[in-house]
Image: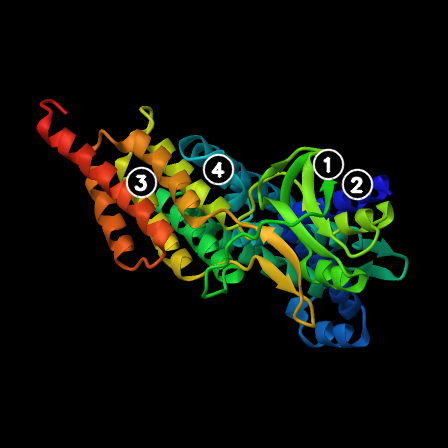
C-alpha cells in the first residue's frame, strides 16, 4: 500500500507541475490550431469552399509551387520570431532572478500572457507545417487549399502585431515595481481564498491518538479538503495535521495524529495519506505565506551591497504591510466539519505574529543602518498598528516599532552614520 501512496502522490504532484508549467497553455493552443487547420482544409475542399473560390477569383491559388513557397516562408519566419521572442524572455528572467530572487521565477514563467503568445506562435507553426503537407499535384489538376493559406497569412499578420506588443509587455513586466505588484496581487488573491473567517481560530492541541509518520520526505503542500472530510466522516475519524503548510516533512517523522473510536488498521491509514500532497516549490495559490516570504527575499536582495536599491526594499515593505492589514482581519480555517457539523480535520497554521517576525526581523537586520528605510518602515508599521485589534500582533508591532525608534535615534546621534 505504501507503493500505491507514493505513486498516487507522484501523479498528483506531476499534475500540479504540468498545469503550472510554461508549456501547458501553449500545448493546448497548439492542438487548437491543429484542429483549426483540419477544419479549414475540410472547408477548402467542400462544395462551399469550391463555390467561394470560383466566385471570388482573388482567393484562388492555381500554382502549387507558389502555395508551398508562401507556407514554407511563413513557417520559417514564425520559428525565427518564436526563437527571438523567448530568447529575450529567458535573458530578462535570468536578470530578474539574479537581481531579486530565484523564488519569483515560478511567478514570472506562469504569466498567462507570455504563455498565450508562445502558444499562438507554436500554433501558427503547427498550422503551417500541417498545411504544407497537404499541398500537392494530382493527375486531375492542381490541388491547392487557397482558403487555408489565406487564413495562415491572416494568422501571420496577427503574429507580427502580437510580437510588437509582446516586446513592450516583456520590457515592462520585468520592472521591480511590476513584479512586486504581481506577487502582491497573487498573495492577496490567495489570502481572500484561504482566509475567510472573521474570528481568529487558534491551533488545537491534538489529544492522544495514533501518530502516523510522513510517507515521504518533502514539502507538505496541503490536502484534498472535501475528499478527506468525507473519508473521515465515513470511517468516523478525526485527523490532526501536525506540520504547517509548506513545511518540510521528513519521512518517518510524525505527520498526522488520528483519533478513532476503535482499532485503526494499516490500510485505513494508507488510504488517509492519499489525500495529502508533497512536492517542491513555493506556490502562492496553495500557501499565501509563500508570497510574504518572496516579498521579504526581494527586499533583502535589494539591500545587498551589489544592488543597493532601498526604493525597491521600501516597495516590498508597503506591499507586506497591506497584506498584513488584510490578514489581521481575516483568518484561515483550522477546523473542517463534515455535513453533520462535526469537526473532522484540524490543521496547524503559522501564528500571525510569527509570520510578521519572520518577514520583518530579517529585513531589519539589513536595513537598520539606513535612515530612509527605517523611517519609511516606521511610518508604514504605525499605520498598520492603528487598525490592529489582535493582542499578539499588537505586541509584535509595538516591539518592532520600539526597535526601529532606537535604531533611528542611534543613527541621528552617531556622527558619520
Q: Residues within 10 Å of mark 1 (few under 14, many from 20)?
A: some
- Estimate the x, y position of residue 344 in percent, counting from the top left: 68, 60
Of the image marks 4 and 1, the number of the one nearer the N terminus: 4
Query: Residue at position x 47%, y 47% from top?
Result: 291
Front of the two marks 3 and 2: 2
- Compared across the picture, whether 318 is left or right of 123 comes to left
**Residue indicated by mark 4:** 93
Q: Residue at x 69, y 72 (%)?
A: 340
Label 3 Cα crowd, 10 Å radius (few <14 / some 14-19 / many 20+): some
Measured in 3D between alpha carbons, the distance from the residue under mark 1 to the one under mark 3, in whole angstroms, is: 39 Å
Query: How far is the residue under mark 3 from the one under mark 2?
Result: 42 Å
Q: Secondary structure at mark 2?
A: helix
Q: Residue at x 36, y 42 (%)?
A: 176
In front of the other: label 2 or label 4?
2
Disc 4/disc 3 C-alpha distance (Å): 17 Å
Query: Residue visible at 77% across and 51% down?
Result: 272
Q: Are marks 1 and 3 in contact (CB under 8 Å)?
A: no
Which numbered disc flags the more N-terminal residue, 1 or 2?
2
Which of the two marks, 1 or 3, is nearer to us in this view?
Answer: 1
Q: Are marks 1 and 2 in contact (CB under 8 Å)?
A: yes
Amino acid at each position: 500500500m505504501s507503493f500505491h501512496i507514493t505513486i498516487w502522490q507522484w501523479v498528483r504532484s506531476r499534475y500540479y507541475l504540468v498545469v503550472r508549467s510554461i508549456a501547458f497553455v501553449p500545448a493546448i493552443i497548439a492542438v487548437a490550431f491543429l484542429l483549426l487547420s483540419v477544419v479549414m482544409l475540410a472547408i477548402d475542399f467542400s462544395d462551399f469552399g469550391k463555390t467561394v473560390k470560383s466566385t471570388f477569383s482573388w482567393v484562388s491559388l492555381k500554382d502549387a509551387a507558389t502555395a508551398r513557397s508562401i507556407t514554407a516562408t511563413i513557417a520559417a519566419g514564425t520559428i525565427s520570431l518564436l526563437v527571438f521572442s523567448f530568447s529575450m524572455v529567458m535573458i530578462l528572467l535570468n536578470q530578474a532572478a539574479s537581481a531579486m530572487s530565484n523564488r519569483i521565477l515560478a511567478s514570472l514563467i506562469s504569466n498567462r500572457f507570455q504563455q498565450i503568445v508562445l502558444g499562438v506562435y507554436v500554433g501558427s507553426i503547427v498550422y503551417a507545417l500541417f498545411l504544407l503537407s497537404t499541398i500537392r499535384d494530382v493527375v486531375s489538376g492542381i490541388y491547392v487549399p487557397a482558403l487555408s493559406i489565406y487564413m495562415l497569412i491572416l494568422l501571420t499578420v496577427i503574429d507580427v502585431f502580437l510580437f510588437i506588443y509582446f516586446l513592450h509587455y516583456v520590457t515592462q513586466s520585468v520592472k521591480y515595481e511590476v513584479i512586486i505588484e504581481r506577487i502582491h496581487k497573487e498573495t492577496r488573491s490567495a489570502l481572500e481564498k484561504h482566509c475567510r473567517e472573521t474570528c481568529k481560530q487558534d491551533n488545537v492541541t491534538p489529544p492522544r491518538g495514533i501518530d502516523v509518520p510522513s510517507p515521504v520526505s518533502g514539502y507538505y503542500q496541503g490536502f484534498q479538503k472535501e475528499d478527506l472530510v468525507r473519508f473521515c466522516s465515513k470511517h468516523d475519524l478525526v485527523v490532526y495535521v501536525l506540520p504547517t503548510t509548506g513545511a518540510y516533512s521528513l519521512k518517518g517523522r510524525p505527520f498526522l495524529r488520528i483519533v478513532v473510536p476503535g482499532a485503526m488498521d494499516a490500510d485505513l491509514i494508507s488510504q488517509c495519506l492519499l489525500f495529502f500532497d508533497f512536492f517542491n516549490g513555493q506556490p502562492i495559490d496553495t500557501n499565501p505565506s509563500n508570497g510574504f516570504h518572496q516579498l521579504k527575499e526581494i527586499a533583502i536582495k535589494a539591500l545587498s551591497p551589489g544592488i543597493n536599491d532601498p526604493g525597491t526594499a521600501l516597495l516590498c515593505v508597503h506591499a507586506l504591510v497591506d497584506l498584513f492589514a488584510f490578514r489581521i482581519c481575516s483568518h484561515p480555517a483550522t477546523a473542517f466539519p463534515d455535513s453533520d457539523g462535526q469537526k473532522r480535520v484540524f490543521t496547524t497554521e503559522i501564528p500571525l505574529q510569527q509570520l510578521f517576525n519572520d518577514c520583518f526581523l530579517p529585513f531589519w537586520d539589513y536595513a537598520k543602518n539606513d535612515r530612509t528605510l527605517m523611517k519609511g518602515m516606521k511610518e508604514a508599521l504605525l499605520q498598520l498598528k492603528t487598525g490592529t485589534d489582535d493582542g499578539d500582533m499588537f505586541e509584535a508591532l509595538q516591539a518592532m516599532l520600539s526597535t526601529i525608534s532606537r535604531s533611528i535615534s542611534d543613527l541621528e546621534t552617531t556622527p558619520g552614520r
